[in-house]
Image: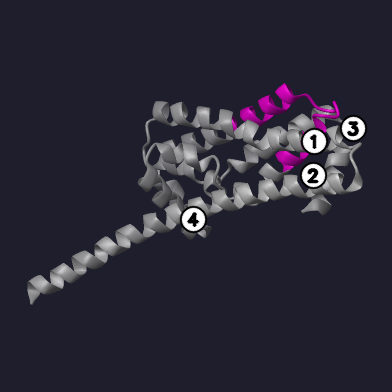
Amino acid sequence: MSSLIDPLMAFVSAHAWLAYLTIFLAALFEAVPVLGSIVPGSTIILALSGLIPGGQLQLVDVLAAAVLGAAIGDGTAFWIGHRSKREILSAWPMSRYPGVIAQSETFFNRWGTLAVFFARFVPPVRAFVPITAGALDMPPLRFFAVNIPAILLWAPAHVLPGVLAVSALHDYGALSHHAHVAKLIWIPAVLVIAAIAGAATWWRHRKRGINIPVKRLAKRASQSSMDRA
């Protein structure tokens, strides 16, 4: 991944407008079904946000590009699902990912309206929940009432860690070698721990959401067998 990100950062650092366009497209593509699970949008946004402390990019403009891209992507996906209904979930290329579609439906059915909020922070479900919400006939006003606040939190959550990490390296650049190395290790460690904790929480809820219906079906089958006997 670094072999792709490093040349990209070097190039866009010399072309600010292209950096903002890249951030916009990264956020947009992350919201596109199937494509969103392939394009490393979050990684690109996090990496480019590291150019803010050096003055190559402006924080407000980066946040605006990320918010706008995510809003257009999510909104477009929702309206496509809203107009096509459930037929879109079985059409190409969605039909090639039945597991993710089923996972998105389970996620949506379990959390309801809040699924739209939570999905913004959970890849690859993030790319499928908006179109699923539309296909399952979620009211547009309810969708956007939850989706827009989620995007407004999602954008800083992806931009600020890169800003803080690079700022910390700049501020403590004059420290001793050991302190500098400790800082380099500490920042990625915190990010990794946070990512692992978030993934573990999501997996626990996902597993619980799948196991409960299975247990209920097993209980009903057992009860039916007893009644027949």
Q: Earlier in the sequence, mark 4 or mark 1?
A: 1
Gap between marks 3 and 2, in whole Å? 28 Å
Does residue 48 show up magenta in the picture? yes
Marks 2 and 1: CB-CB under 8 Å? Answer: yes
Give the number of the mark in front: 3 or 2: 2
Residue for badge 2? 183
* Residue 206 falls in image quadrant: bottom left
Residue type marked 4: Trp
Return the residue at label 4: 203
- The residue drawn where x is 84% and y is 40% is 9
Near mark 3 (Cα within 10 A), the count class, few <14, some 14-19 or many ≥20, is few
Question: 104 or 96, which lies in front?
Answer: 104
- The Cα atoms of the two marked residues, 2 and 1, are separated by 8 Å
Nearest to the observer: residue 89 or residue 103 = 103
Magenta highlight: main SS:
helix
Q: Earlier in the sequence, mark 3 or mark 4?
A: 3
State the residue lying farthest toward the bottom: 229
Residue 92 in view (yes/no): no
- The three-letter amino acid code for the residue at tag 1 is Ala
Percent position of residue 102, x then y: 43, 55
User: Tag 2 or tag 3, which sits nearer the N-term?
Assistant: 3
Q: CA distance from mark 3 to mark 4?
A: 40 Å
Judged from this view, the residue extending furthest toward the top is 60
Q: CA distance from mark 4 to mark 2?
A: 30 Å
Residue 110: within the magenta? no
Question: Which kind of residue does numbered mark 2 sit on?
Answer: Lys
Magenta residues, as a range? Answer: 44-72
For image coordinates 83% across by 53% down, the residue present is 3
* Residue that mark 1 sits on: 168
